[in-house]
Image: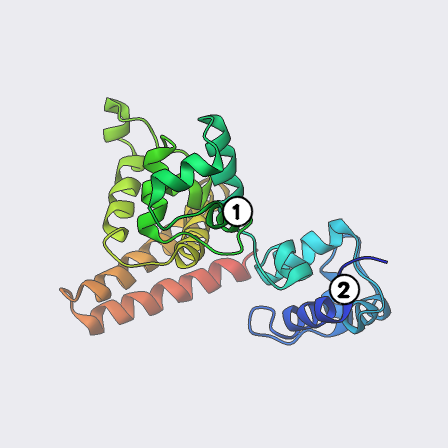
């Protein structure tokens, strides 16, 4: 007997099917999006909690829903913050007791356990303190990615601009969970750079669309003109898609 709540997992799968990109998909259509496809009877069994998809299909369903397999299985996403804190603590050979003592007088070993198991999250202030203590940057805990080294090439690269944006975002009081969601969305924008190779025409329209949206948010441009530019970009994007 497994420890999963099949009924709740089924409800989460159903929610993904019913809200996929704002559309309700039939059992048959939803199953056809998987590889290999699943017939509607099998999808119905998943949603009713009679049985569970295998690991490969769980990952595919999670991708379709824009969630993690942790969310599908447990109703809670594990962001990897706790695991990265634990590994970095072990890298610098610091015990939980030592780390708790250095972070703040009110931090206990139980607090460290809670963070590393993602029962709770440290505040941004605590995360910065942990990063300083463990000789890394706090963004590493949020994203799993190390910052680029401060080299001459770095200052001329897009990574410098990205770090400048991150520094600007630091001024806002985001929770760790909100920052992770923001970073996930940012990765989508970064991946769109691949369009410059795969579909240069589409890439041009997408970048122009974002540019004109930013112009409106800055408030220094004629809104009517920018709205028309946005509409034109969207029309071109649809035309490009229809040609495929």
Q: Residue 32 vs residue 203: left or right? A: right
Q: Nearer the viewer, residue 189 or 139?
A: 139
Q: Earlier in the sequence, mark 2 or mark 1?
A: 2
Residue 182: image location, x then y, percent? 40, 56
Q: CA distance from mark 2 to mark 1?
A: 40 Å
The answer to whether residue 101 is left or right of residue 17 is left
Using the rendered view, name the quadrant where residue 181 is placed.
bottom left
Residue that mark 2 sits on:
31
Asked if residue 145 shows in the view, the reply is no
Residue under the image location 53 percent in, 52 percent down: 118
- Give whichever of 169, 79 is nearer the camera: 79
The residue that appears at 36% across and 51% down in the rendered structure is: 106
- Check contact, mark 2 vs mark 1: CB within 8 A: no
Q: Is residue 98 visible?
A: yes
Apparent side of residue 84 relative to residue 106 in the rendered image (left or right): right
Could you classify mark 1 by the number of other residues whose Cα lies within 10 Å: few (under 14), some (14-19), or many (20 or more)? some
- Report the residue marked by disc 1: 113
Q: Nearer the viewer, mark 2 or mark 1?
A: 1
**Residue at image point 31% right, 26% down:** 149
**Image quarter hosting the N terminus:** bottom right
Q: Residue furthest left?
A: 220
- Label 2 environment density (alpha carbons within 10 Å; few <14, some 14–19, many ≥20): many
Q: Residue at x 75, y 66 (%)?
A: 5
């Amino acid at each position: 007997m497994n420890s999963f709540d099949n009924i709740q997992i089924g409800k989460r799968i159903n929610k993904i099917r019913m809200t996929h990109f704002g559309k309700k998909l039939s059992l048959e259509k939803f199953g056809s999006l998987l590889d290999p496809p699943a017939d509607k009877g099998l999808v119905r069994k998943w949603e009713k909690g009679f049985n569970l998809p295998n690991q490969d299909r769980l990952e595919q369903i999670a991708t379709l829903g824009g969630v993690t397999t942790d969310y599908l299985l447990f109703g809670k996403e594990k962001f990897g913050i706790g695991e990265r804190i634990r590994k970095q603590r072990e890298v610098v050979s610091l015990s939980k007791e030592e780390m708790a003592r250095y972070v703040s007088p009110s931090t206990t070993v139980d607090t460290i356990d809670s963070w590393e198991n993602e029962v709770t999250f440290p505040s941004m202030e605590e995360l910065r303190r942990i990063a300083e203590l463990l000789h890394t940057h706090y963004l590493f805990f949020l994203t799993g990615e190390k910052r680029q080294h401060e080299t001459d090439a770095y200052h001329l690269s897009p990574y410098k601009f990205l770090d400048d944006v991150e520094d600007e975002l630091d001024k806002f009081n985001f929770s760790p969970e909100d920052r992770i969601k923001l970073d996930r969305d940012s990765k989508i924008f970064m991946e769109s750079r691949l369009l410059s190779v795969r579909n240069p025409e589409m890439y041009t329209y997408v970048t122009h669309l974002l540019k004109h949206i930013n112009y409106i948010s800055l408030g220094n441009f004629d809104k009517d003109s920018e709205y028309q530019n946005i509409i034109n970009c969207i029309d071109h994007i649809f035309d490009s898609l229809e040609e495929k």
